Image (spheres, rainbow, N blue to C red):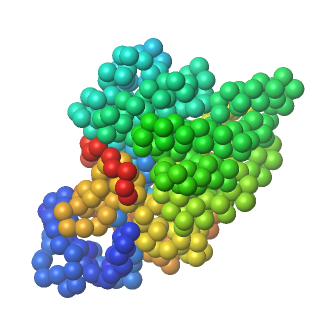
Amino acid sequence: MSLSIKNGRIITADADQVADIFIEGETIRAIGKDLPMKADKEIDASGKLVFPGGIDPHVHLDMPFMGTFSSDNYETGTRAALFGGTTMVIDFILQRQGNSLHAALDEWRGRSNGNCVGDYSFHMAVTDFNEKTKAEIRDFIEKEGIVSFKTFMAYKGALMIDDRQMIGLMEEVKKHGGLINVHATNGDMIDYLVAKHRAEEKLAPLYHYLSQPEITEAEAAERFADMSFYTGCPGYIVHLTCEGALNAVRNATRRNQKVFVETCIQYLLLDASLYERDFEGAKWVMSPPLREKKDQETLWAGINQGLVEVVATDHCPFKWQQKLMGKNDFSKIPNGHPAIENRMELLFSEGVNKGRITLNKYVEVASTNAAKIFGMFPQKGTIAVGSDADIVIFDPKEKHSISAKTHHMNVDYSAYEGWELTGKVKTVVLRGQVAIENNNCLLRKGYGRFVKRSKVSQRI
Ligand code: URP
Ligand code: ZN
Ligand code: ZN
C-alpha cells in the first residue's frame, strides 16, 4: 500500500516548504517537489498545512484515581486523540505502593493491549522506591523501552514519594540512561491547606484552587531542580502552570542546568476565574489548578524563550456524575479535565493565529520536542525520509466550534464549550494508514501500537 500527499505546505520544527510526500507501507520514502511516483491513493493537500502527527506525552486513560476511573479508555481516548490530530500519546502506569513496578506494568497492559486505535507508550510512575523497585529500573529502560519515570511530590499516602526516595530513584535512573518526570507541588503544604479549608467548612471547588497557591508549585519546582542538579539525572516537570515555578527553572539555567518543562493547553488558555462558578467549577478541578492571566503570559513567553518545550493536556476526563462525588467536598472531586481531542486545534487557533507562536514553534511543542525528550525521534515527531508516516493535513482557515455534542471523548461536557476556533484537522495518517477522513475514523482498536523508546539524551 502506498500513499501520496501532494502539494501541501509541510511544516516541521525547522522547515517550511511546499512539496509532495510519498509513503510506502508505514514509512515516509520521499519528500520533494513533483515526485514522479504513482501511489495507490493520492491526497491533494493544496492550500493545506501538513504537520507531523501530534504527540501528547501526558494523558491518563482508564486510570484508577480518587475512587473511580478516568472515563476515556484506551480505545475512546486514542480515537478522540486522532480526531484532534494527535497520533501518539504517552500514558502513565501507577505503581501500587507495596507492589512491584512489573505488577503495575502487567495491570496496565491488561487494560491497554489490543485496545488502542492510535500509537502509545507509558511513563512508569514510581510511588514506592525501595531496594526491590530499584532493581526493576534497568529492565524497564533496557527491555521494555520505558525510559521515563514519573514521580509525585504530592498526593501523600497514595502516590507521593519523599525526597530521600527521589534522590535514590534519580541516581538509579541516571545510571541506566533514563529521565525523571515530576508532578512538582508541595504535597504537605497542600494537605495542610485542604484540611484547614475543610475544617472551616469551605467546601466549594474554589477552595481546591485556594489550597494549591502558586508558592506550593514554585517551591517544589525549585527543590526538584536542585535534586536533579545534584544527581545529574535529567528532569522534566509535567503540567507546569505558573510564573513562580517557571522562574525556578529559569534560575536553574544560571548554573548551566537544563530542566525540561511541559505546560498544558488549559494553563495557556483558561484561568482561575472559572472556579467562581459555584459547583460548575468542578469541570476545571485539576492539579495544579488553573492560575492567573499573568501566568498565561509567562507560559507563552516561556515557550518562545525555549524554557517550555512541550504543550500537553494531562487529559484525565471524568463524567459529570463522577465530578459529583465531590458535590459537598472539593477534596473528593476527581482531579482532571478532558482535552486530548482539542489540544492541536486550540493551540493553532490561539497560538499561531493570534501571533503568539510561529508555525515551526507550534510543531516543536505539539510534537517534535516530546519525541526528542522521550527517546523516539526521528521515528516520531517529524516529517522526514525514514520516519513513521504520522501526518496531519490541516485547513488553517476553516472555522468551527467546540462542543460536547460533537466531540469524540467519552465525557458529557466540554471544558471549552462554545469556543470558536479557526483551523481544523482534516485528514490524519498513522503509520501510512488514513486514520481520519471526512470526519470519520477509519482505523479500529488494535491498530495502535506500543512504541518502545530509546535511552534519552539531554540535548533537544
Ligand atoms: O488533575 C490532574 N492533573 N489529574 C491527573 C493526575 C495528575 O496529577 O496528573
Ligand atoms: Zn500531576
Ligand atoms: Zn497527569
Q: Quadrant of the C terminus?
A: bottom left
**Quadrant of the image occupied by residue 31:** bottom left
> Please, is residue 445 above or below residue 432 in the view?
above
> Please, is residue 34 above or below residue 430 in the view?
below
The location of residue 419, given as percent across then percent down, is 63, 63
Residue lying furthest right: 200
Residue lying furthest front: 255
- Camera-side residue: 120 or 124? 124
Marks counted in the figure total 0
Identified at 60% across, 64% down, the residue is 300
Identified at 45% across, 14% down, the residue is 98
Query: Does residue 325 show up?
Result: no
Residue lying furthest top: 98
**Quadrant of the image occupied by residue 405:** bottom right
The location of residue 316, given as percent across then percent down, is 54, 41
Residue lying furthest bottom: 34
**Quadrant of the image occupied by residue 140:** top left
The location of residue 371, given as percent across then percent down, is 35, 54
> Please, is residue 236 above or below residue 166 in the view?
below
Query: Does residue 199 show up?
Result: yes
In-image side of 117 versus 417 (left or right): left
In-image side of 194 versus 341 (left or right): right
The location of residue 326, given as percent across then percent down, is 71, 30
In-image side of 178 versus 71 (left or right): left
Q: Quadrant of the N terminus?
A: bottom left
Identified at 27% across, 81% down, the residue is 19
> Please, is residue 140 above or below residue 380 in the view?
above
Identified at 50% across, 78% down, the residue is 397
